[in-house]
Image (cartoon, helix red, strand yellow):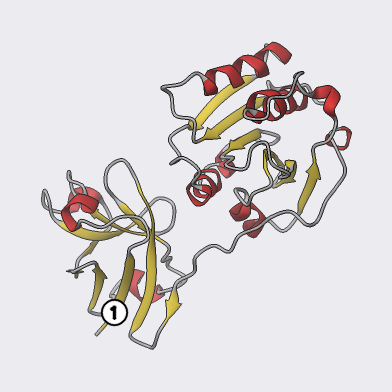
Amino acid sequence: MPRSIVTLTSDFGLTDAYAGVMKGVILSINPEVDVVDITHDVRPYDLLEGALAISQTYRYFPPRTIHMVIVDPGVGSARRPLLVSAANQYFIAPDNGVLSLVYAREEDVTVRHITAAHYFLEPVSHTFHGRDIFAPTAGWLSRHVETEKFGDIVTDHVRFTFPQPKKVNERLLKGVVLRVDRFGNLMTNVTPADVPQLFGENPPAFKVIVGKTEITRMFTAYSQGAPGEVFAILGSSGYLEIVSYRASAAQTLTVGKGAEVGVVFA
């Protein structure tokens, strides 16, 4: 049987010991598991960014991978810990919507409320469920404990609506910047399904408006732009991005997450 894999996605950063402690708990339960960091640089409390991070990565892992997603501003409250089965993968996360994009993309989803306290660390902290509830659950699940032993199925789990582009008229589509990566690239919520003509072989004249800037060039690779030039590109995540070759588009345009994006056709 192949070694189990547990991935970690969180807003803990790497300055503090939180991520390391969770790994220690998992490895104490199953020393044979492989623990993989997806990211710990989700912006604090940013559920949408956490949802994007896991939605862009889980399909690239082997079957039965266990994904811990700990972006948990409601820790210690009545929000529930969840164990989700979908796409032949497992997800362990708080019930706050951070798995909303997984729910939206997968048709066959089973959600369980984790209530089997005998798997938890004791005493359970009111401020660190990642260590005391989620990590132990991941550890025992990686040892092939059946999912039904962790809790009952629920159907009222929290989901938030992902921001969708809005077609204003035949010439104008309005979107929004979802996130800014460490290179200053602006990832929008616009996809080829929203504006297929933009991504065809002979696209019509267009401009992408972000802030006070109009962008009229689109390339297929970053290196096609001149140094410092701002242009559009279809990013690896499948979204339209505003980028700058070897520079930060966010700094150049002085815009960030939440900025309105307009795609206008002649």
In this image, 266 relative to 39: left or right?
A: left
In this image, 110 relative to 44: left or right?
A: right
In this image, 28 relative to 235: left or right?
A: right
Residue at image coords 54%, 35%: 9
Q: Secondary structure at mark 1?
A: strand
Residue 241 at least partly seen: yes
Label 1: few (<14), some (14–19) or many (≥20) C-alpha neighbours in 10 Å: some
Q: Residue 258: x and y, percent? A: 37, 60
Residue type indicated by callout 1: Val
Residue 244 at least partly seen: no
Residue at image coords 33%, 68%: 260
Classify the position of the C terminus by image quarter.
Answer: bottom left
Task: Determine the residue located farthest toward the left in the rendered image.
Answer: 227
Q: Residue 92: x and y, percent? A: 68, 37
- Above or below 33: residue 162: below
Looking at the image, how many numbered discs can be counted on the residues? 1
Q: Residue 80: x and y, percent? A: 74, 43
- Above or below 25: residue 234: below
Classify the position of the N terminus by image quarter.
Answer: top right
Q: Residue 86: x and y, percent? A: 71, 47
From the viewer's side, name the closer residue of 226 and 30. Answer: 30
Residue at image coords 57%, 42%: 73
- Above or below 28: residue 120: below
Place residue 69 in its image quadrant.
Answer: top right
Q: Which residue is mark 1?
A: 264
Residue at image coords 36%, 55%: 257
Place residue 162 in its image quadrant.
Answer: bottom right
- Above or below 96: residue 16: above
